[in-house]
Image (spheres, rainbow, N blue to C red):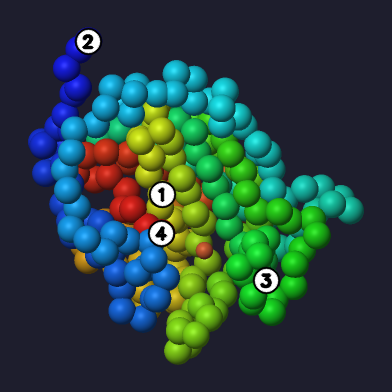
């Protein structure tokens, strides 16, 4: 039996903590539930953790490539196309990455029992998709732009419009959970989650780019976004 490989210390140290969320944020009670309360301990990963499962895309198949719908089933809101590219630290595409995407509707409401926001549910909008990156690392989603929403019991804090991402690598333990923001949104400046990243360049990498409208489809705005999955410019982990 081969010796269990250890986490590369070099890999861990290449991550600049200023580019990552600071963990428990004052004023955002949920971060205390989503962050370890004890200091992290480094332990070697097992062979199974480093190699399994063998076929992630079969266990996590593609689900919906379109959240906006058409005609009578069209979700309410501004139609957008999200063009997200998954790349490694050298900018090379990561084909086969499983990308889960979810966001609230155009009134700021999630389809989730924990969402007690009084905004209306849109019966034509579910709000979650799972895609698999192609050879160029690209995943494309047709959807509607999510709205801002107030954080309950948070003294007037509103989340800016944002999209949640979960990116799986080849194995279960290779997973990045993060959020994408929209350019030019005034609420970005005060958002406790976005600003939990201390490095301004790392924050800027969390904001999508609006593609030139003359080049896109007539009925939708196109937002381009890049997720770097490792290395010094790796996307920030955000809850
Ligand atoms: Fe959210």
Q: SS class of the residue under badge 1?
A: strand
> Image quarter for residue 8?
top left
Q: Which mark is residue 162?
A: none
Quarter of the figure with residue 38: bottom left
Question: Crowding near pointer 2: few (<14 within 10 Å), some, many (20+)?
Answer: few
Q: Which residue is mark 1?
A: 177
Mark 2 or mark 1: which is in front? 2
| The N terminus - image quarter | top left
Compared across the picture, whether 82 is left or right of 73 comes to left
Image quadrant in which you'd find residue 141: top right
Where is mark 4, residue-wise? Answer: 239
CB within 8 Å, label 3 to label 4 = no
Tag 1 or tag 3, which sits nearer the N-term? 3
Q: Which residue is mark 3?
A: 107
- Mark 1 to mark 4 CA distance (whole Å): 7 Å
Query: Where residue 50 sits in the image (x, y, percent)?
Result: 30, 26
The number of numbered discs placed on residues in the rendered structure image is 4
Q: Which residue is mark 2?
A: 1
Q: CA distance from mark 2 to mark 3?
A: 55 Å
- Circle nearer the N terminus (3, 4): 3
- The reply to whether the C-beta atoms of the residues labelled 1 and 4 are less than 8 Å apart is yes
Q: Looking at this rendering, what residue extends furthest in the top direction?
A: 1
What percent of the width, then of the height, locates residue 104?
61, 62
Image x and y of residue 188, in percent: 41, 71
Q: Nearer the viewer, mark 2 or mark 3?
A: 2
Instruction: Look at 44% across and 40% down and name the residue there.
Output: 167
Give 77 or 171, whichever is nearer the viewer: 171
| Residue that appears at 60% across and 29% down | 61
Between the C-alphas of marks 3 and 4, the distance is: 21 Å
Give the alpha-carbon distance from disc 4 to disc 2, as whole Å: 38 Å
Left or right: 73 in relation to 213: right
């Amino acid at each position: 039996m081969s010796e269990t490989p250890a986490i590369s210390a070099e890999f861990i140290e290449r991550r600049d903590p200023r580019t990552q969320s600071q963990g428990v944020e004052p004023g955002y009670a949920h971060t205390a539930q989503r962050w370890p309360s004890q200091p992290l301990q480094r332990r070697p990963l097992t062979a199974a953790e480093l190699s399994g499962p063998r076929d992630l895309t079969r266990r996590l198949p593609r689900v919906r490539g379109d959240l906006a719908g058409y005609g009578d089933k069209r979700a309410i809101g501004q139609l957008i196309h999200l063009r997200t590219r998954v790349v490694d630290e050298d900018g090379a595409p990561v084909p086969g990455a499983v990308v889960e995407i979810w966001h609230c509707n155009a009134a700021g409401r999630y389809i989730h029992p924990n969402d007690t926001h009084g905004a209306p549910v849109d019966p034509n909008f579910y709000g979650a998709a799972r895609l698999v990156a192609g050879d160029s690392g690209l995943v494309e989603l047709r959807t509607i732009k999510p709205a801002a929403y107030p954080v309950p019991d948070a003294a007037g804090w509103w989340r800016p419009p944002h999209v949640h991402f979960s990116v799986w690598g080849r194995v279960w333990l290779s997973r990045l959970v993060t959020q994408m923001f929209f350019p030019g949104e005034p609420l970005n400046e005060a958002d406790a989650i976005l600003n939990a990243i201390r490095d301004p360049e790392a924050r800027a990498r969390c904001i999508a780019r609006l593609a030139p409208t003359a080049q896109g489809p007539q009925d939708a705005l196109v937002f381009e976004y890049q997720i770097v999955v490792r290395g010094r410019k790796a996307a920030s982990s955000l809850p």
